[in-house]
Image: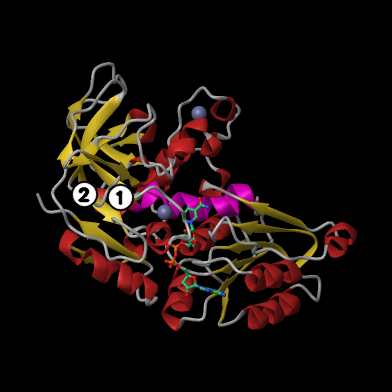
Amino acid sequence: MTGTQRDWELVELELDDPGPGEVMVRWVASGLCHSDDHVRTGDLPARLPMVGGHEGAGIVEKVGPGATKLAVGDHIVTSFLPTCGHCRWCATGKSALCDVGAVLTEGCLPDGSFRFHRNGEDIGQMCLLGSLSQYSTVSEYSCVKVDDDVPLDKAALVGCGVPTGWCSAVYAADVEPGETVMVYGIGGVGANAVQGAAAAGAANVIAVDPLANKRETAEDLGATHSAESAEEAHNIAQELTRGVGADKAIITVDLVTEQVVGAAFEAVRKGGVVVITGLADPNKLTVQLSSGVMTLYQKQLKGTLFGSGNPMADIPKLIGLYQAGKLKLDELITKTYTLDEVNQGFEDMLGGKNIRGVVIHEH
Ligand SMILES: NC(=O)c1ccc[n+]([C@@H]2O[C@H](COP(=O)([O-])OP(=O)(O)OC[C@H]3O[C@@H](n4cnc5c(N)ncnc54)[C@H](O)[C@@H]3O)[C@@H](O)[C@H]2O)c1
Ligand SMILES: [Zn+2]
Ligand SMILES: [Zn+2]
């Protein structure tokens, strides 16, 4: 991506060897998440040019000096959030907020320098990764080793969409057995909020999406009800709870608006929680709510990164749930693409055709 509102381009870049605490990865697969498109539209302001892709899995090709966690040939899933392990946030179990994340929109590695170059110009890496490239040099802070028999094309999704959605339900919303949960927006993130809510024991999971294919998939993944609009979902929640309202609402739409936040806030009960996982331009105001209602009904509104999970703990946990047959990954992949079909892949995402599209790299 060389500038906003442009297509993704396939170009040859120079790639540096891994430095201290870094590895070179040969990417196997990269999921197409909406956040890359937010960089393209400018809704997520970032330094450009940047190599896209932040939902990847691959194999370690080279190991830099002092990299101790990984060896050549290791299979890895990369977290879209780096975690250093010893900043204040990492040390207190809030590693989605790791201070190294400060370089995310710059696209450099944790030491502030760049590994991709073109004609003397530094090129960034989306979320320190750039998995829409055949190779990248990445920080060990971004890598989670997985067993060699984990299929990397499926595991790639556990780099962003799966943990973000699942953890949004399990941690950020703290869904409890018997609760009624609304999930607004069934893409790669929302589909996993549905799986997370079901896994946490929700009695009712109401999936909201204007698209019929999304609602069908949500029901296959554990949603008990689905609705075409927030209004229809509100009525279902009222009926299911005898007028009390939903316990939790999770917003995973592609672009968060005042309307969807307002609808979720209205749908939750006294003491209910609304979680905002979807993104919107940070320079725009997208929440307008009555603080009086918030106070008098003790409703809560919170934002979340990575569903407030911890990548180094939750990525292996989710892979384990997949291996145990308790988390669906294969069913999330609607279509695969080659790297030169990447613009088609994003177009299909924007057209609502995919739960997830995945680029499979050819080497
Ligand atoms: N907080 C985080 O850590 C984090 C991590 C990853 C992605 N994200 C963000 O999460 C959002 C979702 O990403 P995705 O890849 O799943 O997107 P996606 O495009 O695959 O899916 C979005 C879905 O929302 C639906 N939708 C749009 N408006 C709606 C509305 N008003 N009501 C109900 N449904 C609606 C669309 O039909 C679509 O199915 C994006 O904003 C992405 O940037 C956040
Ligand atoms: Zn993502
Ligand atoms: Zn940290």
**Which class describes the residues within 10 Å of circle 2: few (<14), some (14-19), or many (20+)?**
many
Left or right: 171 as drawn, with respect to 268: left
Disc 1 is placed on an element classified as loop
Q: Residue at x 25, y 71 (%)?
A: 344
* Residue occupying the far right of the picture: 296
Left or right: 263 as drawn, with respect to 127: right
3D distance between C-alphas at marks 2 and 1:
14 Å
Location of residue 70 in the rendering, given as x and y in whole percent from the top left corner = 27, 26
User: Mark 2 sits on what residue?
Assistant: 133
The region drawn magenta spans 157-173
* Residue occupying the far left of the picture: 363
**Which class describes the residues within 10 Å of circle 1: few (<14), some (14-19), or many (20+)?**
some
Q: Quadrant of residue 275?
A: bottom right
Disc 2 is placed on an element classified as loop
Quarter holding the N terminus is bottom left
Quarter holding ligand 2? bottom left
Is any atom of residue 30 visible in this view? yes
Location of residue 320 in the rendering, given as x and y in whole percent from the top left corner = 39, 43
- Type of residue at label 2? Ser
Residue behind label 2 places its C-beta within 8 angstroms of ligand 2 = no
- Type of residue at label 1? Pro
Location of residue 319 in the rendering, given as x and y in whole percent from the top left corner = 38, 45
* Residue occupying the far top of the picture: 66
Q: How many numbered dots are placed on residues in this image?
A: 2
Task: Report the disc number at residue 49.
Answer: 1
Residues tagged 2 and 1 counted as in contact (Cβ below 8 A):
no
**Above/below status of 48 relative to 246:** above
Left or right: 115 as drawn, with respect to 279: left
**Viewer-nearest residue: 112 or 94:** 112
Magenta-span inclusion, residue 41: no
**Viewer-nearest residue: 102 or 263:** 102
